[in-house]
Amino acid sequence: MTEPLVEIKNLRTHFFTDEGVVKAVEDVSLTIPRGKTLGLVGESGCGKSVTALSIIRLISPPGKIVSGSIAFYDDGRKIELTTLPEAEMRKMRGSRIAMIFQEPMTSLNPVFTVGSQIAEAVRLHHRVSSREAWDRAVEMLHKVRIPDAQRRASEYPHHFSGGMRQRVMIAMALSCNPKLLIADEPSTALDVTIQAQVLDLLRDLQTEFGMSILIITHDLGVIAEMADDVCVMYASKVVEYAPVVELFTNPLHPYTRGLFASRPEPGKPKDQKLRTIPGVVPSPLRFPSGCKFHPRCAYAQERCKKEEPVLRRPNLSQIPPSHVVHCHFAEQIEEQEEAAVKSV
Amino acid sequence: MTVQAPAPTPTAAAPATRPLLQVTNLKKHFPIRRGVFQRVVGHVRAVDDVSFHINPGETLGLVGESGCGKTTVGRTLLRLIEPTAGEIAFEGRDVRALSGGQLRQLRRDMQIVFQDPYGSLNPRMTIRAIVEEGLIIHGLGNRKERLEKVIDTLEDVGLDPTYINRYPHEFSGGQRQRICVARALALNPKFMVLDEPISALDVSIQSQIINLFTELRRKHNLTYLFISHDLSVVEYISDRVAVMYLGELVETGTSRELYHHAIHPYTKALLSSVPKMTPGKKPERIVLPGDVPSPSRPPPGCRFHPRCPLAIDICKVESPRETIVDGHMFRCHVMEQQLKSPASKK
């Protein structure tokens, strides 16, 4: 067990809108290990981005962290992020926790050169001369493998392609040596060949800088390549949480199973229909009662409609203790599925 | 109205059948205009010399990265964009020569579904009006018959026909995409261009829509051009796949051939870039250096050569021609030499 860098316990983040309270994050607990990568996977609106924004405290009204704790362990000190004064939090952002977003096009200021934007981030956190900050910017652009970094530092964002802009964002995020990098769909807006470049780069930089990464994505392939641990979210809740190889070999929650089964994979027979998850993702304003997945779940029973399950260790011998699932009937479903596989 | 030819059996890629759609040397160059007088200062060669065919009942997948011209190909086929040069033959008729009534007839046979189900439905029209509009424009049936057709079509795409008087905003993304499909399907087309039809949808909804397409294809004997950047989905749904790079087709083959025995170095790199679902293993990946160049100034010779791991001198000057080995087409100097020299044959 590696020691944790961030420990989130029972986090609740709600949005108080005119139409009602949107419970975007409900009772989420997770751990980001030091120097490792936690993958947060789920569909749009499941609360994965809000969880990340809660860590870096970028939730603005009508949103609010209602309860729970986010502990950040920095050089043996425990810092509680939910109650940290805003001035202190501002120091954390950039120097300890940095974030990159899906849209590298809109995250850069078009009227400043990329070098000066990175240098600005450096000078916010370190007392250095502008010359030194500029040199640091060039060094970072070099580290994210932008060719001819010296010259490109004086160019404007519109001179860069999508993949190059995402590299600039990564350079800026890592310029102050953060302990945690939050990457919110970092490769979704990019083409596959460029996505491959960016993911490889992130992995290499993690080895070099030793930071932890929280990667948010809806793409299970990206999770497989990047994450050490995986947390699956559905309708504001964590529904399954396990080390990556364990999750991919033994998905237990019906939602996770559905996600795997509905992907067309190379080698799957073509004449067979894809398995689907029926219905649609529920609106956070009108979540179903009991287990929020029950209206779409093939295994749902009376109990699922009334009683919300807890995140628990399933009573199955082959499942390691690090694997938890948010389902009343995980054991029975596993038995049924096993039997179905054997009978084929 | 023309008498329909006896329906050809939809055996995928049977070489004897006449193709439903034959595209030859298709080109689309968009002029770049600058200055006060809007002088043409150059051209974006979005599609350059693209040739392919689609057999009746077949699904051709068209893959490539953004800006490679795949959407432009789809739209020129329906003449939503006028091609600059080349031939498009649909059931033997020259699509570019048609006008007026004939063109309208053609558009009944060829329909398109777009990527964004949020932007492609008029928010002020009811579902009924949206699906019925095509029937009215083509003067098909009276009021009662049209209503029946709308209800039939909605059932076909898996929507409850009691929703007929609702507006698009009342539906989820997946349902909206079903409405878009119903609108295209109402005219009984023979051929549909599906332009990234599932990219905007949630993962758990995508498989529902993929199943819908395969079901409709079987039921109505449809032929698809499936445009996408999602390589696993294309492999699943397509009989044959064409790969585009910077306005040109670089490789075409049956989906089994292409995914297991890709020849062109770009196809190989593209396939190796897809994140694999095998955690714990370090991906074996061909990482391409650099970005896709701008189609307004494509590199000379083979357009892929600045990023190609195999490039040799000839690639910088001469554009590779089409080479066909067992129905598998590719354009690459290096692979052509390799496959033709008998010593290297495995």
Image: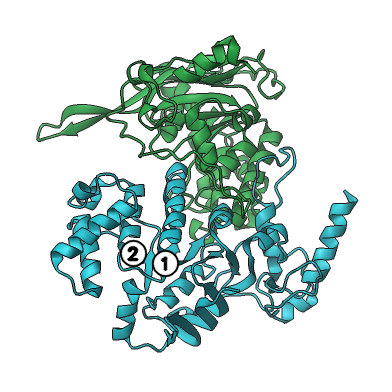
Chain colours: A cyan, B green
Compared to A119, does B65 lie above or below?
Answer: above
Disc sitting over residue A173 in the figure: 2
Task: Give amino acid for label 2.
Answer: Ala
Task: Give left or right: position of B16 versus B104.
Answer: right
Residue at the far right: name it: A343
Residue at left offset 30%, top offset 62%:
A172
Residue at left offset 54%, top offset 77%:
A3
Helix, strand or loop for disc 2: helix
Label 1 and label 2 in one chain: yes
To which chain does the residue with label 1 belong?
A: A
Whether residue A278 is visible: no
Could you tell me residue A185's position as x and y percent? 45, 59
Residue at left offset 40%, top offset 34%:
B68
Q: Quadrant of residue B287?
A: top left
Mark 2 neighbour class, 10 Å CA radius: few under 14, some 14 to 19, many 20 or more: many
- The quarter of the rendered structure image containing the C terminus of chain B is top right
Whether residue B207 is visible: yes
Could you tell me residue A153's position as x and y percent? 21, 52
- The quarter of the rendered structure image containing the N terminus of chain B is top right
Mark 1 neighbour class, 10 Å CA radius: few under 14, some 14 to 19, many 20 or more: many
Task: Give amino acid for label 1.
Answer: Leu
Could you tell me residue A72's position as x and y percent? 45, 81
Compared to A243, does A17 lie above or below?
Answer: below
Residue at left offset 31%, top offset 26%:
B299
Estimate the spatial distance between the alpha carbons at disc 1 and disc 2, rounded to whole Å: 7 Å
Mark 1 vs 2: CB contact within 8 A: yes
Residue tagged 1: A181
Task: Give left or right: position of B305 versus B158.
Answer: left
Total label count?
2
Q: Nearer the viewer, residue B2 or B314?
A: B314
Compared to B67, does B346 lie above or below?
Answer: above
Q: Quadrant of residue A62?
A: bottom left
